[in-house]
Image: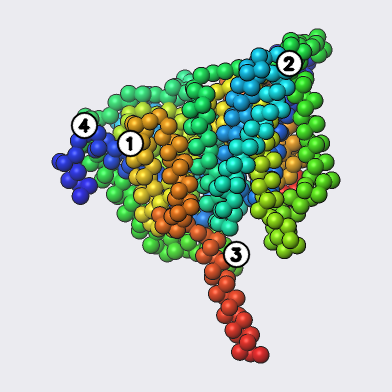
Amino acid sequence: MLLLAPFFVTRFYIYILSVIFVTALLAMSLNLLVGHGGVYQFHHAVFYGVGAYTAGLIAAKTTWPVWIGFCAGPMVAAAAGWVIGLICVRLNKLYFGMLQISLGSLIWIVALRWYSLTGGDDGIHGIRMPEILSSTVNVYYFLLAVVSVCLVAMFLIYNSPFGVTLRAIRDNPQRCEAVGINVRRHQLLAIVIATFFAGAAGVLFVVLEGSIFPDMLFWVLSLEVFIMCLLGGGFTFFGPVVGAAIMVALRTFVGSVTEYWTLILGIVLILLIFFLPEGIMGINFRERARSRSRRAAARASEGADAAG
Amino acid sequence: MEFNVSFSGLIIQFLVGLSRAMILFIVSSGLSFILGVLRVPNVAHGSLYMIGAFTAHTLAMAAGGGVVGFWLAIFVSPLVVALISLLAERLLFCHLYEREHLMLLLFTFALALILGDLTKLTWGADYRSLVAPPFLQGSVSVLGTPFPKYNLFLLAVGPVVAVGLWLFSSKTKVGKIARAAAVDREMVGAIGINVSWVFAFAFVLGCFLAGLGGALVSPTLSITLGMDHTIIIEAFLIVTIGGLGNIWGAMVGSLIFGISQSIGILLWPQFAIVFPYLAVVIILTMKPTGLLKSVW
């Protein structure tokens, strides 16, 4: 259906769909950590930005073919993810998130202040793309292809023994540690994978918009992506795609009517929290853990009764 | 990089950092208090700080500026912020305490979005600035270098708030209950205390401090949309390096943050904001749970 979309809808909607693809890939990559890994990656957008800046700078400042930038983007992002992950992974939950925010903010500051290289707070606009990626429809198909490949790869990872182990770590890190799983190494590998895909999303953003700017690395975007995961349902595989689509659609369509679209977004979020907490948002780590421990307790007391 | 920094310049910069730290302390102690009692990172804290600053400006202008307007702004705008937070808490937030923590986080984010846009709706996107009252204008001479009087005022206010908060939380009954609820909320509920109201109180007090910080900072910078984004990240990092929920930790974190930034301006102006973040990275790598004891 998405393949045929360009034949039926206007260029504007093709563009919106393209934005959704890029955002969805970013949200999916974060969800690999938050939803499946139980890793509180609070500042995920940094790697999106690193991927975009790598591709953008190679396209704008060097004479190398852009494809080199496209390949380098995710790799540099993954490398950054590896370094930052290595430092953070020893910490738990909220502390992990906080250290990650401050390390990520260091990269953000470099992008913001290194005027001669990155263009500072203006960023760089009008990055030229190769001939084949000049029409909206071609870009659309390119994004669709890349995002599909990435999603398939993520789905394979999700169902691989590694993915299963990761979810086991999320649900009970102590037990995993006890049965001999190297929890930190698994989480670090998950971070590298997730940041790789975030970098890929960043590259796609450059393809789509032809520009890079420091807000891509700002923590507000990270929070937005985090919210997309929660909104769509962090435990489901495709949840973040839904979350991203809702977010982009809200921004585009409500944003075109009123400049106060975040007000509407806030109200929608509150309505969802109150009326659909389990619906689109299936995230309930502790709820699950609690019901599991309750069941275990019931079984234990049954056993005790039987014994007594 | 050039190092032609005079000794008095260093002292002045240190004092500027110290007075900046006082603002950071007032805001982050409120955040820390909420984090300690409710266990929720209040993302809306920055928005409330911003509303505090805008309200202070409006009140001061309404009172015709001058000394009366200034005191009115300082004392009343935190109350306005507290009222807003009380409404949000009693009407919406208090129904969510039984929920998953990420839901609470999501709620405060939604609140931040709403408050941010309401601020834009009420005050518009213009820059504003509040003029300090005559007795706090100008500067005094410290080692022959001028130092703004208003910063001196901040240096006095910060410790007053710190001691007040400490006295409150360690000497009064309400404060003790709040601290107890931070440690073990089930037990506090079990001995017949209405935990929901304790939470409401802690939330409102924390937001009051955000408003106070916003009001106090308004004469030192331009009041604008987006000031919430800067402060909230700084406050979060301060609370983390200080130890979650620990008021004195918030003080230590603020001092580190404020001073490293102002000394950074001397060393490498272009990348001055790197320094506090570097300090956070160093501290958290060495001592992951923060410098002082966390209440968690």
Spatial CA span between label 2 and label 3:
60 Å
Which residue is at a point 59% across and 51% down the rendered structure image?
B94
Q: Secondary structure at mark 1?
A: helix
Spatial CA span between label 4 and label 2:
62 Å
The image shows residue A174 at horizontal and vertical percentages of 60, 64
Which of marks 1 and 4 precedes in the sequence?
4
Q: Secondary structure at mark 2?
A: helix
The image shows residue A206 at horizontal and vertical percentages of 34, 33
Q: Which residue is mark 2?
A: B67
Quick one: A297 or A65, which is closer to the camera?
A297
Question: In the image, which is nearer the foreground, mark 2 or mark 1?
Answer: 2
Q: Which mark is residue A253?
A: 1
Position of A141 compared to A99: left or right?
left
Q: Are marks 2 and 1 in contact (CB under 8 Å)?
A: no
Which of marks 3 and 4 precedes in the sequence?
4
Same chain, marks 4 and 3?
Answer: yes
Question: In the image, which is nearer the foreground, mark 1 or mark 3?
Answer: 1
Q: Is residue B86 above or below residue B66?
A: below
Q: Amino acid at mark 3?
A: Gln
Give me the chain letter of mark 3.
A
Q: Are marks 2 and 3 in contact (CB under 8 Å)?
A: no
Spatial CA span between label 1 and label 3:
46 Å
The N terminus of chain B sits in image quarter: top right
Q: Which mark is residue A174?
A: 3
Same chain, marks 4 and 1?
Answer: yes
- Neighbour tally class for label 3: few under 14, some 14-19, many 20 plus, Cα within 10 Å: few
Same chain, marks 1 and 3?
Answer: yes
Q: Are marks 4 and 1 in contact (CB under 8 Å)?
A: no
| Residue B203 visible (yes or no) | yes
Give me the chain letter of mark 2.
B
Which residue is at a point 37% across and 33% down the rendered structure image?
A255
